[in-house]
Amino acid sequence: MFSGSIPALVTPFRDGTIDEGAFRRLVEWQVAEGSSALVPCGTTGEAPTITSEEQHRLFEVCVDAAGGKVPVIAGCGSNDTQTALWHMQVAKDLGCQAALMVAPYYNRPSQEGLLAHFSYLAEQVDLPMVLYNVPGRTVTDIKPETTIELARRFPGRIVGIKDASGDMTRLTAHRIGAGTQFIQLCGNDDMALHYNAGGGVGCISVTANVAPRLCADFQAATLSGDMAKAHELNERLFPLHQALFTDASPAPVKYALSRVLGWIGEDVRLPLVKASAESRKAVDSALEWAGLV
């Protein structure tokens, strides 16, 4: 259903508002460069600081600009179950193919609470869900046993996970418990090579915003077993994977895009600020290493 290089799209801003024209161009460029699916309104899309109305408009523009060529996995997660439900209903109505559902943050539900939250959503909306586990941001960890139970309860409805836990052992645990059809997508670009070797089938990527063709070719190499090419591309991209997190994301990736494309600016919404001079220097070096500038 979903595999390969899947960019977690930035949300371009201009003068404090969403630059819809730039976002549309970004989607069209990503499709042309080989990205296999698109994620609007995830962490990299600054979901915490966009309004619900803006979020739903981004869903709509993404679906329209993608033109049915690749699926759209809409960032619908919330720490309020009813808000998450609303986002999912809108995403389905607008033609998104799935929802990316982050673990509820700040209120720190138990594993039983996570089961109840995701089960309720799966029962209410007929839209495939990709769980998003990023405990470094949410302080809530979707444990393997919880993931497996959700996949068992809702086959075809809870279809996979974006795992940014950094725990590679979960790949095997999920494969044993949820089956090999359960989609496992890496949430950390710098771990994607090893993740796919362990049973993953792709990456929801920050770096793919800037280097979609290289990331798509890298994913194709890993999934076809061409490990010589995979290592070559991984080493070309690796400094960029690291540079894009030398300051609060997505400030460094927006700076990188401003250099690579020119028509996406660096603006982020408070409390985020533009990338520091030190971060820019690291990004510049990594872009040169990758041959992108």
Image: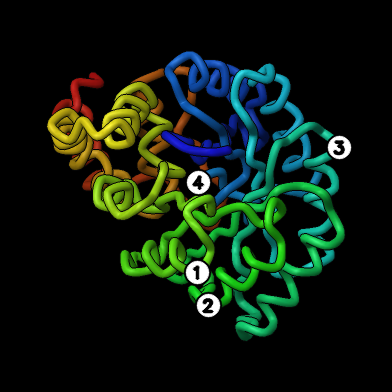
The mark total stands at 4
Label 3: few (<14), some (14–19) or many (≥20) C-alpha neighbours in 10 Å: few
Of marks 1 and 2, which one's residue comes earlier in the chain? 2
Q: Is residue 275 left or right of residue 31?
A: left
| Comparing labels 4 and 1, the label whose residue is closer to the camera | 1
Task: Give the SS element for disc 1.
Answer: helix
Of marks 4 and 2, which one's residue comes earlier in the chain? 4
Mark 1–mark 3 distance (CA, rounded to whole Å): 32 Å
Q: Amino acid at mark 3?
A: Asp
Tell me, for residue 44, which label it has, or none: 4
Question: Please, is residue 125 above or below residue 11 in the view?
Answer: below
Q: How is the image coloured?
A: rainbow
Q: Please name the residue that numbered disc 3 is placed on.
A: 93
Q: Position of residue 186 (x, y in %)?
A: 40, 51
Q: Please name the residue that numbered disc 1 is placed on.
A: 177
Of marks 1 and 3, which one's residue comes earlier in the chain? 3
Q: Position of residue 38 (x, y in %)?
A: 56, 33
